[in-house]
Image (tube, rainbow, N blue to C red):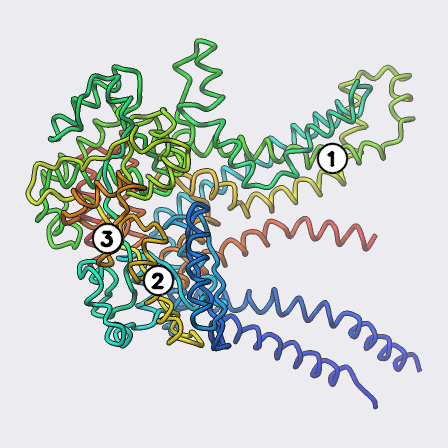
Amino acid sequence: MTRARTRHGGLVAWAFAAPALLVYFTFLVYPALSSLWFSFTDWDGLSPGYNVVGLQNYASMVDDPVVVRAALNNLIWAVVTVVVPVVLGLVLAVLLNGKVRGKPLLRLVFYTPAVLPLVSVASIWGWLYNPEYGAINAFLRSAGLDGLAQPWLGQDSTALGATMVAAIWLRVGFPMLLYLAALQGINPDLYEAATVDGAGRWQQFWHITMPGLRPAHYVVIALSVIDSFKVFDLIYAMTYGGPGTATQVMGTWMYFNVFQYNQAGYGTAIAVVITVVAIAVSIPYVRSQTREHAA
Amino acid sequence: MTVDRRRFLQLTGGAALATGLAACTGTGGGETASQNAKTLRLFTYEDNATIELLRTQVKTFDAQNGTTTTVDSLPGSGAAVYPDKLRTELLGGKGPDVWRIWGGQIGAPFVKAKQAMDLSAYYSKFGWDAKLNQAAVAGMTFDGVKGGLPFIALGIGGWYRKAAFTKAGISKPPSSYGELEEANAKLVASGVTPLGTGGKYGWHVMRLFEYLLEVSAGPELHDKLLTGDESWDRPEVVTAFTNFKKWQDQKWMPTGAVGLDPADVELWYVQGKSAYTITGPWTEAQGIQSGGKKSADFGVFAFPTGHEPARHSGFVEGYMINAKSGNPDMSAALLDFLIKPETQKALKITASVVAGAEPDQATLPLSYEWAQGPGQQPFYTIQDQAFPKKEADQYFAVQSDVLQGKTNPAQAAKKMQDVVKAWKK
């Protein structure tokens, strides 16, 4: 009787899940498996035919200097565009959580970049960085700092950093908003009690605020890390991977190979590597979330 | 009816597989572009200044033939982006019946992959060979396959603002490379950047380098370099890279030019931010006149090479027909209509390869001047069409390194030889 009910219950559950599974398999699993298959071929991305080349595309990546550069750029990008926005977001959230005049307006100001289309962000910063007429160099020159005026996006030494500044500006609002929400959940009595016990603001921050934000840290950091490994659009729109290949990341290099160089097999091999890395990075986050729900 | 889990999974799994395979068929490009014989789709990259002219002409064609043709455009996308969009459409199985494309190595992959139709039969049917400039036809012929129908052969020259030249004390355009350098020095002294150019996506800064290569190598060697028949590791190439660096060091082009978007920088000469640019006759209608300026305030000159023939950079554009088009005959008829001299004139094509479709002197005086003068000279293939995209990007990377001082001219020549050698292998 119990087994029959369980079996029946299982079928109902599967029936409810079926539409979502269908979509999932059709639009995610199937294309992903197709990509995996193409990564073992020499398909040019246009022709109807191709040859199976085994692991050759993966082996070629080792000898591709742009892949090495792109992987390094991805790593730098991940560290900088995770650490800086998270720290800044936390600082802003703590400041805006206190008694600040014009708090709603300030929240809006800091969060607005996060809702802008990335192409708009790229255009805005492209103009700011314009070496001849951009506001940044104009400001530096007017301040008598001509020597600091640079072709920010036009030289290898500054191009990646310049795009990361735009990314930081764009991404600060997201952790700020999550931390603000999490700060609302910390019992204010704890701060009162700590004040009575003589704890300073710094001690209160480290011993009450930071532990209270632990769940938010998981979400913010994990999502930021995953996001940073998927970087594509900002680089594409601001530098197109240049000058030369100075700002190539794995995502753009994959795109160039698949869509521009007629090397779809090789490009999809790069895509597979990006996916594997993104999955590996997201495992701790998924496990923590699963544990939380199980508890 | 009793359904157990295994049966349920079989059913849902089968449905998922069927849907997946259907999606597979759809994305595999198995469908024809236009199944309806009276429906066509044309994909192009006309900008806002010219797209309505094209739509008007296509409507005329539709009225004459009882067809319905949709015209889609991706304005301002350039050769770095437009082919990607086209490729995605073709792979999605819903590609256009007809598309506009550049010649050389940009159009070649579509013919090689048999996405574009061999038009030889239509060349015979409509007598296109007799109507078109044969050099342009060669630019749309790939490994002996007439994969496209050219309608434009565009030459690249120096388009300048007369006021900037006058202010710098330059009475006439330069007639030798030495005079060009002198003019640059005078322009810098007068407070204006001589050449407005940008290297994002590579190709505009490339226009300067290919000119410098023509100057130092001469026509014959230049052509052999582009085809890989001569080594790039030679003094003429080193000289070209040396001069290239000089242009940056002397501030004859904008600081950090390699990072600037050419779509922005090209119009600096119209806006008064630079003295001249390296571009084609389209700039008269799209840059000068659409900006509310008079053609009389500007001029055009061929960059002096010091060689005979005095060549300039150039490229071909044309149309291709989808090999999977549901209506290739009507698509070919549309192309035949578009290359009629009266259609070309109505489209304000400034560099048509169709006999009898020269630019109108009254409305486009500078384009006419170019067409009657330098436009009559032979051209060397613009370098983003001379090389496949991957090699062209490597080429741009070498140029970028030279401008930044990361690679010296001799090393750059060696690197280019490595790039070309790997390509030819």
Residue pictured at 41% horizontal, 51% vertical: B46
The residue under label 1 is A177
Outermost top residue: A144
Q: Which mark is residue B386?
A: 3
Q: Is residue B387 visible?
A: no
Q: Is residue A274 visible?
A: yes
Quick one: quadrant of the N terminus of chain B? Answer: bottom right
Residues at marks 1 and 3, CA–CA distance in whole angstroms: 51 Å
Q: Nearer the viewer, mark 1 or mark 3?
A: 3
Q: Residues within 10 Å of mark 2 (few under 14, many from 20)?
A: many
Residue pictured at 83% horizontal, 52% vertical: A295
Residue pictured at 79% horizontal, 75% vertical: A15
Mark 2 in CB contact with mark 3 (< 8 angstroms): no
Judging from the image, mark 3 belongs to the subunit labelled: B
Residue pictured at 69% horizontal, 40% vertical: A220
Q: Position of residue A4 (x, y in %)?
A: 88, 82
The amino acid on which the numbered mark 3 sits, given as a three-letter code, is: Ala
